[in-house]
Image: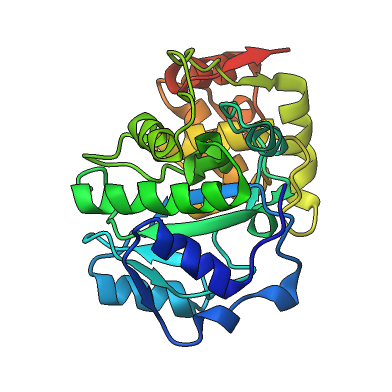
Amino acid sequence: MATPPPARTFLQCLIDEGVSVVEVGNWEDHNRNHMGPWGQVHGVMIHHSVTKGTAATVKICRDGHSALPGPLCHGVIAKDGRVHLVGYGRTNHAGLGDPDVLRAVIAERRPPLDDEASVDGNRHFFGFECENLGDNKDPWPAAQIEGIVRVVAAICRHHGWSARSALRHLDWQPGKVDPRGPGMDWDDILVRVTKRLGTKPVTTPLPKPSRPVVDLSKLAAAARSNPKAAGTPVTYSGVRIVEAALVDAGLLAKPLLDGHYGTATVTAYAKWQRSKAGGSFTGDDADGIPGPTSLKKLGAKYGFDVVA
């Protein structure tokens, strides 16, 4: 837990760590603080931008877009390793995430598998977008990886944190995959940050993460109640696990992965029930309300277990 430093102190921390910094406009005062607090801060989150070209990436991260106002991060780490500072304060980078992951970051231990989205990450994390298409093909140059290492080390050094105070967007929010692609080795980044900080290694060999578990009765209750509910209530965290599987199966659009078992999720699950892989159900048996057979088949194919 820590109070964010003044903007100029933050800048100097980066410079002292050997980061090549580009100051963009009024970055020191550009933020979303009117939407809520920033701090206490607990860590540093790394993203990929799903954009091409440094200028375009910096612009969208500074200005945002119609669905998500900027700034979208504190800094953009370009392919050449330079860090373009676009905002300071609360930014729209993290969204809602898993409280168990937050507790792990605070405790500086490996985060568990994220399966819930109920905690305001924009309040608690520094955020850096990295210029990358996010297609799992766009490579991560050595200079960019070194930029990530130095940025993380700078912030951790200032606050007295270990490398385990750094995390990826995919660690925080269910359904996210960033950062990924050739040259992105997160464990290696943490090791390199640790060496820069002069502290002991962050991990012994990492245990394989356990499979998430979905409770059929809670999921079915959400499927029956959520379509009638206003907004996008997350009535059961397991909804996100199932929605992520439906996205992976090509039956649900990724923007609809929101934890709300609404009409789109009902429709997508009904398609799964009717499919051969889902059990070839028909009529009332393919109504979009999960049953044991179709859910176990979905879990077996997309990586989760089912309890009654």
- Camera-side residue of 85 and 117: 85
- Camera-side residue of 12 and 84: 12
The number of numbered badges drawn on the structure is: 0
Q: Is residue 135 visible?
A: yes
Left or right placement of residue 174 versus residue 131 in this view: right
Residue 6 x %, y %: 63, 71
Residue 274 x %, y %: 48, 28
What quarter of the picture does the C terminus occupy? top right
Residue 182 x %, y %: 21, 39
Q: What residue occupies the far bottom of the structure in this picture?
A: 25
Q: Is residue 207 above or below residue 228?
A: above
Which residue is rendered at x = 50% and y = 22% of the image?
Answer: 298
- Camera-side residue of 120 and 85: 85
Q: Is residue 174 visible?
A: no
Which residue is rendered at x = 56% and y = 26% of the image?
Answer: 110
Which residue is rendered at x = 70% and y = 32% of the image?
Answer: 100
